[in-house]
Image (cartoon, helix red, strand yellow):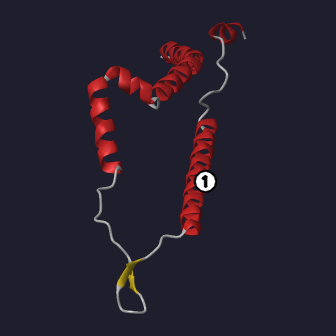
């Protein structure tokens, strides 16, 4: 009975050694698959028609529908309506605010993606498979 238990124990140990030796390769394969699945080019290559359809749908939804123009009017001293003048300063401030918002959004997205990619080890230097065997 003791020899059967010892044989079973040795089988378990051998299996554990096998799992430990395969683990780095499995992790590297999983990392490559995750990187591939997060790459938009992978989906475009695999499903080009669906990708174009999705891009067209997103573009259609992103563009706002034209709104009827609202003309601001005011009354002059004689009671006649006059179209309100648009301010050059208002246009400049609006353009600067828009650029600042876009720049801030771009910086936030870059920072978030770099934090996400660094924390998950994507982009880490690849190890040579032969190094694990010799060490």
Residue at coordinates 59% horizontally, 68% vertically from top-left? Answer: 89
Say whether residue 113 is left or right of residue 81: right
Image spot of residue 67 (x, y percent) = 29, 62
Does 44 sit left or right of 38 as displayed? left
Q: Is residue 20 above or below residue 128?
A: below
Occupied quadrant, residue 53: top left
State the residue position of label 1. Answer: 104
Residue at coordinates 52% horizontally, 19% vertically from top-left?
A: 12
In the foreground, 22 or 16: 22
Residue 117 in percent (x, y) is at 59, 36
**Residue 41 occupies quadrant:** top left
Nearest the eye: 124 or 111: 111
Task: Give whichever of 23, 88 is nearer the camera.
Answer: 88
Q: Residue furthest bottom?
A: 78
Q: Position of residue 115 (x, y in %)?
A: 63, 43
Residue 8 position (above or below residue 69): above
Quadrant assignment for the C terminus: top right
């Amino acid at each position: 009975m003791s020899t059967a238990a010892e044989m079973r124990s040795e089988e378990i140990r051998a299996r554990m050694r096998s799992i430990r030796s395969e683990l780095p390769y499995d992790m590297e394969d999983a990392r490559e698959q995750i990187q591939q699945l997060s790459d938009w080019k992978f989906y475009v290559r695999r499903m080009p028609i669906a990708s174009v359809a999705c891009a067209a749908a997103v573009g259609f939804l992103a563009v706002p529908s034209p709104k009827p123009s609202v003309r601001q009017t005011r009354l002059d001293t004689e009671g006649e309506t006059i179209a309100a003048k648009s301010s050059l300063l208002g246009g400049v401030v609006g353009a600067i605010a828009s650029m600042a918002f876009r720049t801030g959004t771009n910086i936030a997205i870059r920072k978030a993606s770099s934090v996400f990619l660094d924390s998950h080890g994507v982009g880490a230097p690849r190890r040579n498979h032969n190094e694990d065997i010799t060490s």
